[in-house]
Image (spheres, rainbow, N blue to C red):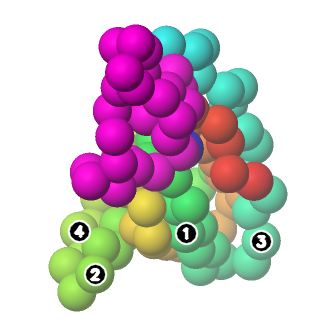
Amino acid sequence: MIPLPNILAAFVNKSGQIVRPWNSYLQQFTQQPPSVASIIVSASPFSYTAREPGNIAITSGTISNIRLSRGIVDIDFGAGTNKIIPVGINDIVTITYSALPTVRFLPSYGQTVA
């Protein structure tokens, strides 16, 4: 994801053409989203910190709890699989499990920050 340019930066030049960094920023919204990325799950409880906006898809395994932490707010999604958790930058998803789940990251737009 390319961050929002400084709002004081010129948007167009004297010819009326959109200039950098605005051109690069806006172009990312016209491109196909990057591929779904597999997340390698380690020991339970496993935590994943999002580096960009997107969704975490959790399937299979035996899950006793899924928790989303955003700042000082925690949201419990409970037990079970086949859940999609929307995340923003620096959100933390913690999965407590007894049988290994499959976890994938679906980016919202732009380029995946691996």
Q: Which residues lie in the magenta part?
A: 2-29
Give the distance between the C-alpha atoms of the residues marked 1 and 4, in whole angstroms. Answer: 15 Å
Please give the label number shown on residue 71.
2
Asked if residue 56 lies left or right of residue 68, the reply is right
Q: Amino acid at mark 3?
A: Ser
Give yes or no for residue 49 being in the magenta stretch: no
Element class at badge 2? loop
Q: Which residue is mark 1?
A: 49
Q: Looking at the picture, how far across and down is residue 98, in whole percent?
A: 64, 68
- Indicate the quadrant where residue 17 lies: top left
Q: Looking at the picture, how far across and down is residue 31, in whole percent?
A: 57, 15
Tell me which numbered mark, 2 or 1, is placed earlier along the sequence: 1
Give the distance between the C-alpha atoms of the residues marked 3 and 2, in whole angstroms. Answer: 23 Å
Element class at badge 3? loop
Tell me: residue 3, above or below residue 110.
below
Q: Looking at the picture, how far across and down is residue 105, in whole percent?
A: 60, 42
Q: Looking at the picture, how far across and down is residue 44, in whole percent?
A: 65, 77
Give the distance between the C-alpha atoms of the residues marked 2 and 1, in whole angstroms. Answer: 12 Å
Q: Residue at x 35, y 67 (%)?
A: 68
Mark toward the viewer: 1 or 4 = 1
Q: Work out whether residue 24 can be spotted.
A: yes
Main secondary-structure element of the magenta-colored stretch: loop
Give the distance between the C-alpha atoms of the residues marked 3 and 1, in whole angstroms. Answer: 13 Å
Give yes or no for residue 11 being in the magenta stretch: yes
